[in-house]
Image: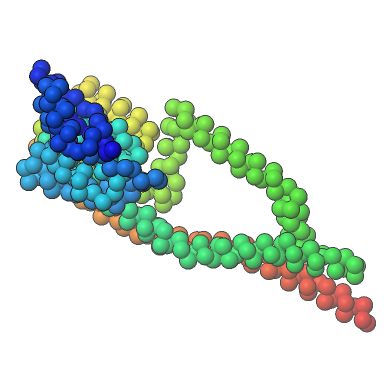
């Protein structure tokens, strides 16, 4: 017997969400009417596929369609209900149905989405909350689509840039393992029998072989211990703050994080201010979407400075959180009265800078990895050739 999920309203106006086993939808409606309930919606529950997963592309499609629907004037619940039926992903269908029930029960869209962290990230939820607070939800959703696409493109670029180096790294690792595990011990054993002295590079290689074959378990324990310790460290407030600050300082990667946040901060803040959200509330929302505990702590200090009477640009300057160009352009917007438009311009600047940074960084990954592998393989080959050359000289000397 199929299971139906229903939403019904009592005579007092209270919404009731539940499920019922019945032979058909009409049977559910009839039973609800007998209970003196006003039927709002009845849907047959789809059996979940095991291992169902909501992919990034599913969320992008969902967000784009949701934005289009509410921008065309459809009510939120109706738009979500349509999306729950249109999605080709059963897991996303189920999540969307639950979101519909929560919104009908009086929750905000952001609160309803927050209950499904595997599908919607904190950034996503907080951006939706900002859109609901500002009345610019369609625009925020389009911004989310752009952000999700940027994140996907960034991952794709890095993956594509790593394909060739990864192949080289694998081939190099196999070659090194064969040399160290088989060829080097046989060669050194032969030389020892013939009384030859091993060159320094070969002796170093032999020590590496000894460590790899005799103490590999120590390395495994160290890796496991470091992994567990790191996870425990970042779960603490101080540890998370330290790690997030360090991430911003990593060459290449940190620059990408910073530029992405500069663009995201200015775009979101400009949208909020242009839609009438007070500055302090807007600062709370842009702090929540940072996704970085260090940035959040700095923005909390900025907010306190603004409460004390400082301008936003001056408060940001004292924290050294944003580049001088950023705060100077913001100050111009504050002085001219076109703050929202100025923030949008700043966002355009740093989005272009982000694209340039990603292109440069991704193009440098392959050469760096290739050089590292070449150095390691070169050292191994040199160690082998040194031993062969030394053995050849020893044999020639004995022949004389």
- Which residue does the image show at 67% across and 61% down from the upper left? 177
Q: Is residue 77 visible?
A: yes
Res 398 quadrant in image: bottom right
- Left or right for 146, reference 138: right
Q: Nearer the viewer, residue 149 or 335?
A: 149
- Quick one: which residue is furthest to the left in this view? 73
Q: How is the image coloured?
A: rainbow
- Which residue does the image show at 73% across and 61% down from the upper left? 181
- Quick one: which residue is furthest to the top in this view? 12
- Quick one: which residue is furthest to the bottom in this view? 400
Q: Nearer the viewer, residue 309 or 183?
A: 183
- Left or right for 8, reference 284: left
Res 124 quadrant in image: top left
Q: Quadrant of the C terminus?
A: bottom right
- Which residue does the image show at 38% across and 33% down from the upper left? 294
List x then y, in percent, for residue 97.
23, 38
Position of 345 relative to 108 (above/below): below
Q: Quadrant of the N terminus?
A: top left
Q: Is residue 328 visible?
A: no
- Which residue does the image show at 29% across and 46% down from the upper left? 90
Position of 163 relative to 23 (above/below): below
List x then y, in percent, for residue 360.
37, 60
List x then y, in percent, for residue 179.
70, 65
- Left or right for 375, reference 1: right
Position of 86 relative to 373 (above/below): above
Q: Nearer the viewer, residue 37 or 168?
A: 37
* Total marks placed: 0
List x then y, in percent, for residue 48.
33, 43
């Amino acid at each position: 017997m199929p299971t139906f999920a229903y939403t019904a309203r009592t005579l007092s106006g209270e919404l009731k969400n539940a499920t019922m086993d019945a032979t058909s939808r009409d049977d559910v409606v009839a039973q609800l009417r007998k209970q003196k309930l006003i039927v709002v919606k009845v849907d047959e529950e789809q059996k979940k596929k095991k291992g169902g997963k909501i992919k990034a592309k599913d969320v992008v499609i969902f967000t784009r369609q949701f934005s289009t629907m509410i921008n065309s004037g459809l009510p939120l619940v109706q738009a979500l209900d349509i999306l729950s039926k249109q999605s080709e992903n059963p897991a996303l269908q189920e999540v969307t149905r639950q979101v519909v029930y929560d919104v009908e029960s009086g929750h905000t869209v952001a609160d309803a989405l927050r209950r499904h962290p595997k599908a919607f990230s904190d950034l996503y939820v907080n951006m939706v909350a900002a859109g609901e607070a500002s009345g610019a939800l369609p625009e925020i959703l389009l911004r989310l689509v752009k952000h999700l696409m940027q994140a996907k493109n960034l991952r794709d670029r890095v993956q594509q840039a790593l394909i060739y180096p990864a192949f080289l790294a694998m081939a190099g690792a196999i070659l090194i393992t064969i040399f160290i595990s088989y060829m080097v011990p046989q060669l050194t054993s032969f030389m020892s029998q013939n009384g030859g002295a091993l060159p320094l590079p070969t002796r170093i290689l032999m020590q590496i072989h000894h460590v790899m074959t005799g103490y590999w378990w120590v390395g495994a324990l160290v890796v496991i211990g470091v992994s567990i310790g790191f996870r425990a460290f970042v779960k603490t407030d101080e540890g998370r703050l330290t790690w997030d600050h360090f991430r911003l300082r990593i060459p290449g990667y940190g620059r990408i994080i910073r530029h992405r946040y500069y663009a995201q901060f200015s775009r979101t803040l400009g949208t909020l201010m242009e839609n009438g959200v007070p500055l302090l509330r807007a600062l709370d929302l842009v702090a929540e979407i940072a996704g970085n505990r260090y940035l959040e702590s700095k923005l909390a200090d900025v907010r306190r400075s603004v409460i004390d009477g400082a301008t936003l640009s001056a408060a940001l300057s004292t924290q050294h959180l944003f580049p001088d160009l950023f705060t100077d352009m913001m100050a111009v917007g504050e002085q001219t009265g076109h703050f929202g438009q100025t923030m949008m311009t700043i966002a355009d600047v740093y989005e272009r800078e982000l694209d340039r940074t990603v292109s440069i960084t991704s193009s440098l990954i392959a050469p760096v990895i290739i050089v590292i592998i070449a150095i390691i393989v070169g050292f191994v080959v040199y160690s082998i050739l040194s031993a062969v050359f030394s053995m050849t000289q020893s044999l020639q000397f004995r022949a004389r």
